[in-house]
Amino acid sequence: MLLGFTKFELGKSNDMSRLRRMPPRRSYDQYCSAARALDAVGDRWTLLIVRELLAGPRRYTDLHADLPGVSTDVLASRLRDMERDGLATRRRLPPPGAAYVYELTARGSALLPVLQALGAWGQAELGERGPTDAIRAHWFALPLLRALEGEGLVEVRLEEGCFHLFAGAAEGPVYGHGAAPGEPDARLVMDTGTCTAVAQGELSLVEAVRAGRVEVNGDGTFAKELREA
């Protein structure tokens, strides 16, 4: 206890003071819902930070590692903006972690369909992967969610890495990094080209399985349905 404040209260007070010192956000000053939305998420990198935080709480260093090209100053500034605008919060993990993590608020999580629609619209812009294009396995998570039908925990393994999807999740993270927590309803193994084709809608997951381009493992209902389709 310090001067009547607990450590938690003092930390919360410091966070609020930090946010109050921030300059007001820029605005289009237009009485239009699209303009108001862009006031909050129209800055470069903001929606990509949301994409990363849809996987659940993440440390600053993890965000920086999975957003190649963003400077530390810009990332820190965008995260502060997102806190101020009620899209994300920052909290300290209990020991032994004792690190700060960022996570989406309910308002921030509500941007999932926005990112889904934006990703569907941008499919035509992908084309061939350029020699300088960065790639992370979990960047396929949101496009694959659009291609999956039903509900369940699905683990996906690519050459670039592994991630898992919470298909049909009503709340909480919609995907996660690494292997699934527990036994998934289905484990899918495929190459990046197949994953891209499925994510872009050029090939359905069932067609990819029938063509032998996706290996399906697991005893869950979803895995059985895919193998029997």
Image (cartoon, rainbow, N blue to C red):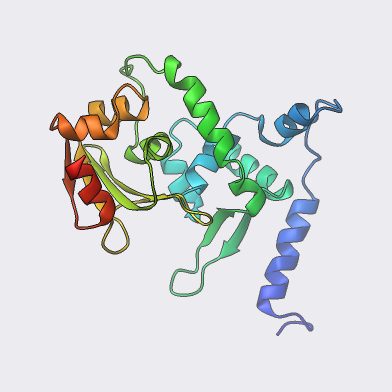
Kindly identify the residue that appears in the image at 34 percent across and 36 percent down: 136
Kindly identify the residue that appears in the image at 43 percent across and 21 percent down: 123
- Horizontal arrangement in the rendering, residue 49 relative to residue 178 (left or right): right
Residue 113, x across and y down, in percent: 56, 38
In the rendered image, which quarter contains the N terminus?
bottom right
| Displayed quadrant of residue 143 | top left
| Closer to us: 9 or 49 | 49
Of all residues, the one furthest to the front in this rendering is: 229
Residue 157, x across and y down, in percent: 23, 43
Residue 17, x across and y down, in percent: 78, 58
- Horizontal arrangement in the rendering, residue 114 relative to residue 179 (left or right): right
| Closer to us: 57 or 80 | 57
| Displayed quadrant of residue 25 | top right
- Horizontal arrangement in the rendering, residue 172 relative to residue 202 (left or right): right
Of all residues, the one furthest to the left in this rendering is: 212
In the rendered image, which quarter contains the C terminus?
top left
Is any atom of residue 228 visible in this view? yes
> Does residue 77 sit above or below 102 in this rendering?
above
- Horizontal arrangement in the rendering, residue 12 relative to residue 160 (left or right): right
> Does residue 108 sit above or below 100 in this rendering?
above
Kindly identify the residue that appears in the image at 54 percent across and 29 percent down: 117
